[in-house]
Image: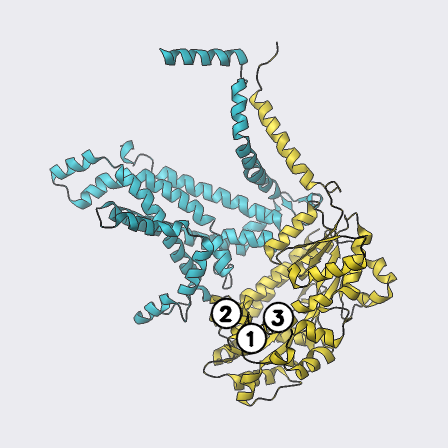
Chain colours: A cyan, B yellow
Amino acid sequence: MATATVVAAGTKARTEQGSGIRPSGWIGFLFIAPNLLGVLAFTLIPLISVVVLAFTDWNLVSGLGGITFNGIDNFVAIARDPGFWHAIGLTLVYVVVSVPLTVVLGLALGIALNRPLPGRAVLRAIFFLPYIVNVVAIGMTWLMLMNPKAGLVNQVLDAFGIQPGWFASSHWALPALIVMAVWGGVGYCSLIYLSALQDAPRQLYEAADIDGASAWSKFRVITWPSLLPTTIFLLVTLIIGASQGFGLIALITAGGPGDATTTISYYMYQTGFQFYRFGYASAIGLVTFVGVLVLTLVTWRAQRGRALNDQ
Amino acid sequence: MRRKGFSRREVLAGVGAGLAAAVVPGCSGGDSGRSGALQVWGGVPAASGPADVVKAFQAKFPQYKVNYTRFVNDDRGNLKLDTALQGGVDIDVYFTYSQGAMALRAGSGLAADLTDRVKADPDLQVFLDTEQPRSYIDNGKVTALATAREPFFVLFNEKLRQQAGVELPQAWTIDEFRATARKLTTDTTVGTYTLPDVARIALGPNYWYDGNRSNFGDPHFEQGFRVGREMIAEGTAFPWTEVLSRHLDAYQQNSFLGEEFHLWSTAPFNLRYLYDAKKYPHDFKVAFAPSPTVDGQNWNGGSFSNFIMVNPKSPKLEAAWAFVKFWLTEGATPMLKGGKMPALGNVTDEQIVSGMLGKEPEKYFDLDSFRRVVLAADPKLATDTRLTGFPEISLAVKQQRDLCWLGEKDPGVAIREVRRLADAAIARNERRP
């Protein structure tokens, strides 16, 4: 009864004011205004600016008066730019290798940490630690670990007769970054999987146990479908994150040796902030945005109807 | 009927207006909010000299107050300066360190035309010289003036040199440099960090350009890549894998002080690491040799640098010019402690020795060779004035040099790739309005 009264009162208020906001409503807007201002200033306005600048030739230093609209010239130039396609290729390799590896290892770790283990809480914290450590500390640590001559990694690999050049080799620099990305992301994935595993339907496992199902069958038929929404969430966020990967590259390799680690976000940074070609960099940003959006939608659609709840 | 609330549109419009009100004044080019003090932005920390320059200026001109702001001289720091200049932040005088940034700022109306002031001042006539330019002249207008002279020289670790029984050269060629590095290489010390820039010594200023194309077809570029690679391969130059994996390019001094390598081709700004044994412990003296010559050519790899510029929007142009002139003609002595020798050379030898070599110069430096190489010599400094596509070409040279010196790319192939990229960068930049 009380609910019905509140609903009726609310309907009456809306009817009186048409599409307007109740006096108490704009107070709500005032509460979110600081955040709204932040979103406007640091997200929406830059986003719109990038879209506009993508159709210009602008070097920033010449000021707003120096903006010259050049139609689709930037996009034509992108299509013919070998540096852009090289960066796209590297980014795809980086995403296609690092994301599935992170998810698979995160899943394995999540399942392992879901079992009763001595010191499980401590182990969870340890594995999650790389996700919250500052990127500079991560970069400097790995730089030392992967020093081709004196680094611990190569001292271990030396026993197997392998001596990768890591960041001092155009062949090994990208794999080194992938190793770091996987190491940094596995703990995060495992934690997300852990929470999903704890929500998995117990009764289905009990029924499977009664039916004498094997561990693999239980994983395939119950665990995996129940984890699919989580997996898609992780895939989408990791794909977006990996496509934007910049911090470690800027810190450790600056896109090198040569252009061996010039992924698309670093290429965009070089174009904008080193060459001051802000119009062209914005066009690269726009094209990349569309690419990542398509990749995300494809990933999203691929899981529809396959999750446990959808079946 | 009077409305009781605001529509969503009105609230959003209000928020937008508030945002605009907050943002627009920051973008204003007007003088509102400008302080009374002269605002100077530079990349050198105030304690390394600028604070003393400012103090001396204020003592001489008590009518002016100066506020020095330090920006970090890297990509982000320069971007901060550029956006501040463009956004109307209160800046009257600023410094530019990279050639690429200078061309961009001068070409975009961010530098006042100083030509008449320079022409009118007998002390500053040298800034009109175009043979060994100390200024940046853009379409006949002087827009930037060098405050520092940074000649390159080769430093020797005296302890290791004497152990090896090598003569300190007073004049030498690049081949002799290579032979000396070989003699100085031991089990624990590499002969040299790297090779001086062969093409720069042979070709001088604007060596990347030839008409409306790049000049990387000149054989000295390939020679530099090839000799550098050979020296690394034979162990007489520092292994490039170590340089990249330890980011040594920015920390060469640590390896020199740690006696990991011997010969160090460098400039005065690195001398500050050599006279402070508490902060940078070492137990050896350093001697100076001139840069080697290439095919009889003796351009020095160093240049006139640290360009001072005046913001054309400054409402205090007279005060700004007074400060610029003071820095150039009489105020730059405190900058010696950071290794900045005044571009006009208007300091005594003793001021340079005590300013650049610390409190105990005899303890850490061979003063005879310092006087001979740095004070008495008049090296031909190569200051670039042609800067089309400069950042792109710099990156191409660095990328291909790295691949070549890692042993992954043949020097000829690497130089041809630099040439292709440089030609494209020049063509693209010359097409721009």
Residue B354: assigned label: none
Q: Farthest residue to the top: give it.
A: B1
**For residue B194, which numbered disc appears in the image?**
1
Q: Is residue B350 visible?
A: yes
For disc 3, the marked residue is B272
The crowd level at tag 3 (other Cα within 10 Å; few <14, some 14-19, many 20+) is some
Q: Amino acid at mark 2?
A: Val
The residue that label 2 is drawn on is B243
Q: Secondary structure at mark 1?
A: loop
Cβ atoms under marks 1 and 2 closer than 8 Å: yes
The chain identifier of the residue carrying mark 2 reads B
Q: In screen coordinates, is B255 left or right of B39? A: left
- Tell me where residue B429 appears, x and y as whole percent: 67, 56
Under circle 2, the secondary element is helix
- Residue B86 in the image, given as x and y percentages of width and height: 69, 47
Q: Residue at x 50, y 14 (%)?
A: A14
The answer to which of marks 3 and 1 sits earlier in the sequence is 1
Quadrant of the rendered structure where residue B264 is? bottom right
- Residue B314 point in image, percent of width and height: 77, 49
